[in-house]
Image (spheres, helix red, strand yellow):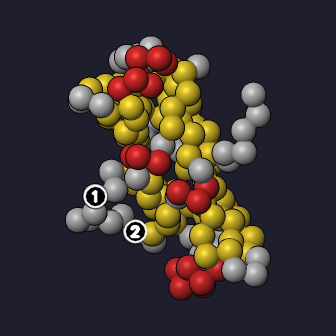
Amino acid sequence: MSLSIRNQLPGIVTAVEAGEVMATVKVRLTGGQEIMAAITLEAVRELGLAEGSSVRTLIKSTEVSLATAAVEGLSIRNQIPGTVADVVTGGAMARVKISVEGGELTAAITKDAVTDLELAAGVPVVALIKSTEISLAAV
């Protein structure tokens, strides 16, 4: 199956914490980063997710925010450091490709944000992703 979701990073489930309806699933990406996904408990069961399961994390590029340094005092759990690899701007929006350990992320952000953050190839950034915006696929 082909998907329009640009960000597809493989990893291994390291923990599943189940609630009444939702669960948090911690995944160690192939680059060593820890990422957390908040998905339904039903999805955890249907995918057969447990510690040690191989998964692919799926993140729409519109759900990736960028900062020029790590951010504290923020509810966003997932902060992945990387380096800008490429920036392509259009009329109002821009596509920013970020090299991260073990792969690449793409962020779709405004052209103004690119200008304000002075983003260009080689600039270090931190990708910020809410756990509720990460989907998981069993591999």
The x and y percentages for residue 56 are: 56, 30
Which residue has dot 2 on it?
Answer: 69
- Is 103 positioned to the left or the right of 63 in the image? right
Query: Which quadrant would the C terminus be assigned to in this image?
Result: top right
Q: Cα distance, mark 2 to mark 1?
A: 16 Å
**Which quarter of the figure has residue 15?**
top left
Q: Which numbered disc flags the more N-terminal residue, 2 or 1?
A: 2
Residue drawn where x is 47% and y is 48% of the image: 133
Element marked by disc 1: loop
- The label on residue 75 is 1
Q: Nearer the viewer, residue 89 or 4?
A: 4
Pick the front one: 124 or 35: 35
Question: Measuring 36% from the left and 18% from the top, which residue is drawn there?
Answer: 51
**Residue type, label 1:** Ser
Residue type, label 2: Ala
Q: Give the numbered dot on residue 59.
A: none
How packed mark 2 is, by other alpha carbons closer than 10 Å (few <14, some 14-19, many 20 or more), is few
Between residue 139 and residue 31, name the one nearer to us.
Answer: 139
Residue 25 x %, y %: 36, 31
Q: Is residue 44 left or right of residue 17?
A: right
Q: Which one is closest to the eye, mark 2 or mark 1? A: 1
